[in-house]
Amino acid sequence: MIAAQMVDPMWEEQMANPVDTVIGRYVTPVMKPAGFRKKGRSYRLTGDNGDLIIVEFDVRSEPGVFAVDFVMVPLSRWDWLNRNDLGLSAPGAGAGVVRCDIVPPQHVAHRFRAGPPFSYRWVVDQADEGTRCGTALADALKDRLPLMRQLLDRETVLREASDPDSGIRRLMSKELLTLFLRIDAVDATGLEDLLARLEPDQPNRESIVDWARTRVAERT
């Protein structure tokens, strides 16, 4: 029998994507104590009502370049997306209703070859083993952790999404966002008021109305 060859852990780390190395060294030690669960290149914080904050890393094809943002996913939005029982196991970042980019400071920001000098993308400098990038990223996430926790409150989401200086961007119309965030706090009369605010050309308007009325009726 041929003995199994031992693999040097340092060699394995060197062969890993440099972004994954930074995530493991600098991000997990920040997010795990804050209550986030790691899943692939994302971290999830679940509220008491099932709503989620998802922090997601988008790794680009260029080595060491990535973007990071977080979204808020209300359970109501997930229920709408999975209304036909598609068998989806868990909400993804695509189910978010608002989004916030974690923007890098200039010294660890990716430089465009043309156009603006810096972007919202981060870049790992392998010459310092990702130390500058990882340290800056950990600090940026720590700064945003209080806001992430606050966004598990749906009324806070509405307030922050209305503030142009908050960095929180809506991923849908204000009216639809309000529906998803308030549907579980209104009775049938209050729901009709929310539905009346939807634009006539809102995509899937009739299906949304039927789904919303059913959800509120089942609760009340």
Image (cartoon, rainbow, N blue to C red):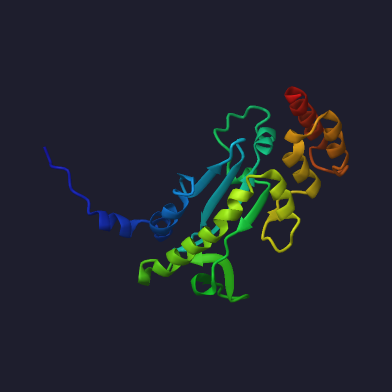
Q: Report how many numbered discs are placed on residues in the image.
A: 0
Quick check: 163 left or right of 22?
right
From the viewer's perspective, is residue 220 above or below residue 161? Answer: above
Is residue 163 placed above or below 126 in the rendered structure? above
Residue drawn at the location 79% of the way across and 49% of the way down: 174
At x 63% / y 56%, what residue is drawn?
100
Query: Is 33 displayed left or right of 12 in the figure?
Result: right
Seen at 39% across and 54% down, the residue is 24
Q: Residue 193, relative to residue 124: is it above or below? A: above
Q: Viewed as shown, does residue 177 lie left or right of 68?
A: right
Residue 115: percent from the left, percent from the top? 63, 75
From the top left corner, tell me how far across and down residue 197 is, in percent.
87, 42
Q: Quadrant of residue 78?
A: top right
Give the quarter of the figure containing the N terminus: top left
Q: Quadrant of the C terminus?
A: top right
Residue 216 at x, y = what percent? Answer: 76, 28
Where is 204 relative to 105, above or below? above
- The single residue placed furthest to the left in the displayed view is 1
Measured from the top left, where is residue 168 in percent x and y?
A: 67, 56
**What's the residue at 49%, 70% (across, down)?**
108
